[in-house]
Amino acid sequence: MKKKLIQIIISLIIFLIAFIVPFKQEIINTILFGISYLIVGFEILWKAIRNILRGKVFDENFLMAIASVGAFAIGEYSEGTAVMLFYQVGELFQDYAVDKSRKSIASLMNIRPDVAYVKRDGKIEKVSPEEVKIGENIVIKPGEKVPLDGKVIEGTSMLDTSALTGESIPRDVNAGDEVLSGCINKNGALTVEVEKEFGESTVSKILDLVENASSRKAKAENFITKFAKYYTPIVVITALLLAVIPTIVFGFETFQEWLYRALTFLVVSCPCALVISIPLGFFGGIGGASKKGVLVKGSNYLEALSQVEIVVFDKTGTLTKGIFEVQKIETKGFSKDELLKLAAYAESYSNHPISVSLKKAYGKEIDQKLISKSEEISGHGVRSVVNGKEVLVGNDKLMKQNNIDYAVCNDVGTILYVAVDGKFAGYILIADEIKEDAKEIIRKLKANNIQKIVMLTGDKKEVGESIAKELGIDIVYSELLPDQKVEKVEELMNEKSKSGKLVFVGDGINDAPVLAISDIGIAMGALGSDAAIEAADIVIMTDEPSKIDNAIKISKKTMRIVKQNIVFAILIKVLVLLLTAIGLGTMWEAVFADVGVLVLAIINSLRALRVK
Amino acid sequence: MRKTFKVEGLDCANCAAQLEEAIKKVEGVDDATVNFITQKMTVESSCEDEEELFKKLKKATKRQEPDAKIKEI
């Protein structure tokens, strides 16, 4: 790039001397223009000749070479030199923009750890992360990146996961916790037992995904590639006709004028602005999204996301936390703590998820000595003797079976009625909790004119409907088996318009077939889940469904930029082409139009990288 | 086998697309992508001999884009 800049500067100085100073012999000016031209244009001429010899005639080098040589041939030395000079300025700017974009993506993805400090034979060795084997212990000091996935065996610290998740709140880690590579250790030294090799670690997978993302091309990108294939030959033939036909019609003495117009036509027709700015825009959009913790696997998905009509959510793990927790305790004659304690004790022998949630809510050690008897009544609940009292915990059937006069509860979820010594003592409601931002995302999607929002669940009808109502989702299908979910999504795929897209959002567990058949499959909470990263087209690293809104916004912004560039570049070019054809445009204007459009389109593309 | 190479000296996205087409036609290559922005060529190949494959890719690259060079990473 530096070499090119020096060439341009020297050439420009000679050009200005030739342009401004009126030498006595005009031949000196011509020679100076010629020198200036060759300094800056030799490379292009050489490439053009080489390409013609290889049978590849129509490219930018050819356009520029023929336009400038043609200008020299008709005695327009200054314009011929200017064409080459400004073309090279445009190229230089393009290189600079691409380089800048590459660097900014690289810093965005600057999560690749360079070193690992591994404990070997009682000493700490500095090695590259690739050399560390599973089962070895590594030491991570404050401020360093976690180089490999593993489990903490010593130390406590806070981890900054923002590079992976876009989440700014640090995560606490203690001995026994999993740590993922790519996080930054904030304040305490950690000793970690390595559980995955570097190639299989989270950081490698994410880098691989983002770097390969733009290889799946969007329609707009493919359009440009095809466009360039036909465009240049068409332009060259048109230019040829523009030089020949009017000359035949108006007589040979007008040939020079028409040739000039034809050459100007060639200069302005260079398609570089389109060819470079569109992939640059998509790459920026993908980069911006990954800054937010949303990994998009290809430009095609980013493009599709701007045309979403139907959004289908899985319930458990996507809109709800998928963790059953005690939501409500109603008592009669006991305090809430007492009731919870009795229920937790009574259920303590069971490993059922319900009893696990009860024990978790109780939060204290269970003193097994206090339980003298405990029997499970299948399909009903348990009967235990706790601290000398007979405790019944179970569903309405258990209450009826024992003739207990209980207050019916109509809340949605799993209801555990509790009776102590044959008398109703209250109930405990255990239910899945709705994620904090679930309501917000439904509202935002509706505001964004998404036509249909659907929730699918394998859960009971009442549960599904109650959650859908609370979230404001209109359509809900409950009690679905996994293959029925596939059928439902297939049905919904038929309901959308031709260009509309269907998004399925799941947690990546058990819904791989649905993720696969949807236009766009989004997996949530994927950090640490390889299966979800594999199956989905778009991966949301955190548990927050609200990121979908970010992703749609980024997608729309990127598409807007790409469309602006296509329309802007083609419009200006067509305008200048027309002006040229009727003799109103000069070669100077053509050069500025070409380079100007290129520069503006690139600057516009770089906007895609910036995300609020 | 899936292998990634660094490609230097590509002029434009269009050249990258043309190079991609050329690489896809190389014997033993099942699929290929050339990414202009990341300067990476990813090749899916059934060819077991890595050195042989690299030679073929190098040759094809030189023929298509004389200014471009591929490097092993």
Image (spheres, coloured by chain):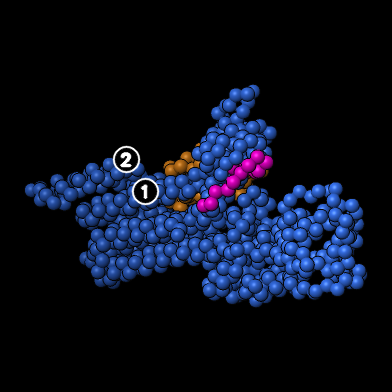
Q: Quadrant of residue A188?
A: top right
What letter labels the chain drawn in orange?
B
Q: Main secondary structure of the magenta part?
A: loop
Could you tell me how far apart the alpha carbons at marks 2 and 1 are, in whole angstroms? Answer: 13 Å
Examine the structure image and report whether residue A175 is included in the region drawn in magenta.
Answer: yes
Q: Residues within 10 Å of mark 2 (few under 14, many from 20)?
A: few
What letter labels the chain drawn in blue?
A
Q: Residue at x 16, y 51 (%)?
A: A19
Badge 2 sits on which subunit?
A: A
Q: Indicate the amino acid at tag 1.
A: Tyr
Q: Position of residue A384 (x, y in %)?
A: 88, 57
Tell me if residue A199 can be seen.
no
Q: Position of residue A8 (x, y in %)?
A: 27, 45
Q: Is residue A365 left or right of residue A288?
A: right
Is label 2 in contact with label 1 (beta carbons under 8 Å)?
A: no
Indicate which disc residue A96 carries.
Answer: 1
Label 1 sits on a secondary structure element that is: helix
Q: Is residue A160 above or below residue A453?
A: above
